[in-house]
Amino acid sequence: MPVEWTPNLTVGVEHIDEQHKTWFKKANELFEAGKERRAKEYINQMLDFLDEYTKMHFRDEEAYMAKINYPELEAQKKAHESFINDLAKLKSDYNQNNGNVLVIINANNMVLKWLTNHILNMDKKIGEFAKNL
Ligand SMILES: [Fe+2]
């Protein structure tokens, strides 16, 4: 299943939406690398790119929520932290399994589901809140 940003995921805060699109792209690059059975070094690099981008995005999103006094910032921080841990676990599982690409391919659904559910259930509310400021 391809990991793609779709318009129903629009939050309504431009820089967040732009970052979400790139976020999907980074995830997609990782899964493509898995499907193409690329070398371990390459896949680890894609894992690092996704991890770095995710952290940068969460930092920006949390700063924005703090700036507008968004009431659900703490719940967002917890959700973000848990996904960062999922990504770290994915990287260690992959390396502990000697770079078995199945670990990456099997994570496709988990990551896709997390991204879409998080944006639909949590991030869209940021946009709703910001609209009424
Ligand atoms: Fe979020």
Image: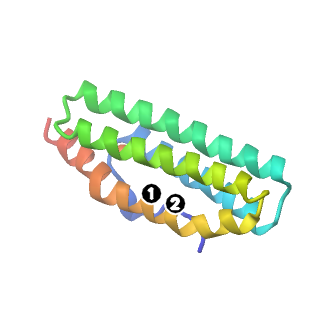
Q: Position of residue 24 (x, y in %)?
A: 55, 55
Q: Where is mark 1, residue-wise?
A: 115
Is the C-beta separation of discs 2 and 1 under 8 Å?
Answer: yes
Up-down relation of residue 129 to residue 66 (above or below) = below
**How many numbered discs, if any?**
2
The residue lying furthest to the bottom in this view is: 1
Task: Please give left or right for residue 78 compared with residue 95 in the image.
Answer: left
Ligand 1 visible in quadrant: top left
Does the closest atom of ligand 1 sit within 8 Å of the Cβ of label 2?
Answer: no
> Looking at the image, which residue is at 32% across and 59% down?
120
Q: Quadrant of residue 36?
A: bottom right
Task: Please give left or right for residue 78 compared with residue 43 in the image.
Answer: left
As helix, strand or loop, the secondary structure at mark 2 comes to helix
As rendered, which of 16 and 101 lies closer to the eye? 101
Q: Where is mark 2, residue-wise?
A: 111
Q: Quadrant of the N terminus?
A: bottom right
Q: Position of residue 40 (x, y in %)?
A: 82, 52
Q: Quadrant of residue 97?
A: bottom right
User: What is the three-letter code of the residue carrying label 2?
Assistant: Val
As rendered, which of 128 and 74 lies closer to the eye? 74
Q: Quadrant of the C terminus?
A: top left
Up-down relation of residue 16 to residue 113 (above or below) = above
> Looking at the image, which residue is at 61% across and 45% down?
50
> Looking at the image, which residue is at 31% across and 49% down?
123
Task: Please give left or right for residue 108 compared with residue 85 in the image.
Answer: right
